[in-house]
């Protein structure tokens, strides 16, 4: 009887594992879209552009570069997590 009671939990766990790659793909697609939109913005263009007067180090531009790195890191993390589940 104990074995029968353990099975539904195992089935639910198996079902969740099957849905996880799909959810990771959806999250990766959303994160990639957000990164592309960010990189197409004027804010990004000004932050990444060079300036001979040191304007590149302006706090607003530093925040933009930090956001860019955070978005890149999010995409890398999701790709790595997805790769683990596709083995």
Image (cartoon, grey):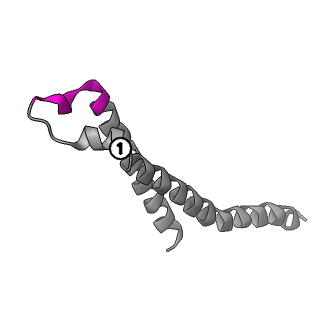
Front residue of 7/57: it is: 57
The residue sitting at 91% across, 65% down in the picture is 1
Residue 73 falls left or right of residue 51: right
The residue sitting at 42% across, 51% down in the picture is 35
Question: Which residue does the numbered mark 1 point to in the structure image?
Answer: 68
Residue 80 falls left or right of residue 12: left
Q: Is residue 63 above or below residue 30?
A: above
Label 1 packing within 10 angstroms: few (<14), some (14-19), many (20+): some
- What is the span of residues highlighted in magenta in the rendered image? 53-61
Q: Residue furthest left?
A: 52
Front residue of 3/14: it is: 14
Front residue of 3/37: it is: 37
Report helix, strand or loop for mark 1: helix
Please state the horizontal and vertical placement of residue 12, each as a whole percent of the image. Answer: 77, 62
Q: Residue furthest bottom?
A: 87
The residue sitting at 35% across, 41% down in the picture is 42
Front residue of 52/11: it is: 52
Residue 76 falls left or right of residue 33: left
Which quarter of the figure has residue 56? top left
* Number of callouts: 1
Q: Residue furthest top?
A: 59
Q: Residue furthest front?
A: 42
Please state the horizontal and vertical placement of residue 51, each as a whole percent of the image. Answer: 13, 36
Q: Based on the picture, tell me whether residue 29 belongs to the magenta stretch.
A: no
> Main SS type for the magenta part?
helix
Please state the horizontal and vertical placement of residue 21, each as a whole percent of the image. Answer: 59, 65
Which quarter of the figure has residue 4? bottom right
């Amino acid at each position: 009887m104990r074995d029968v009671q353990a099975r539904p939990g195992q089935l639910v766990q198996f079902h969740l594992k099957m849905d996880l790659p799909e959810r990771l793909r959806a999250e990766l697609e959303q994160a990639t879209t957000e990164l592309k939109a960010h990189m197409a913005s004027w804010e990004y263009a000004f932050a990444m552009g060079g300036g001979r007067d040191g304007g590149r180090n302006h706090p607003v531009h530093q925040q933009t570069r930090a956001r860019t790195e955070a978005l890149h890191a999010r995409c890398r993390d999701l790709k790595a997590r997805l790769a683990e589940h596709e083995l």
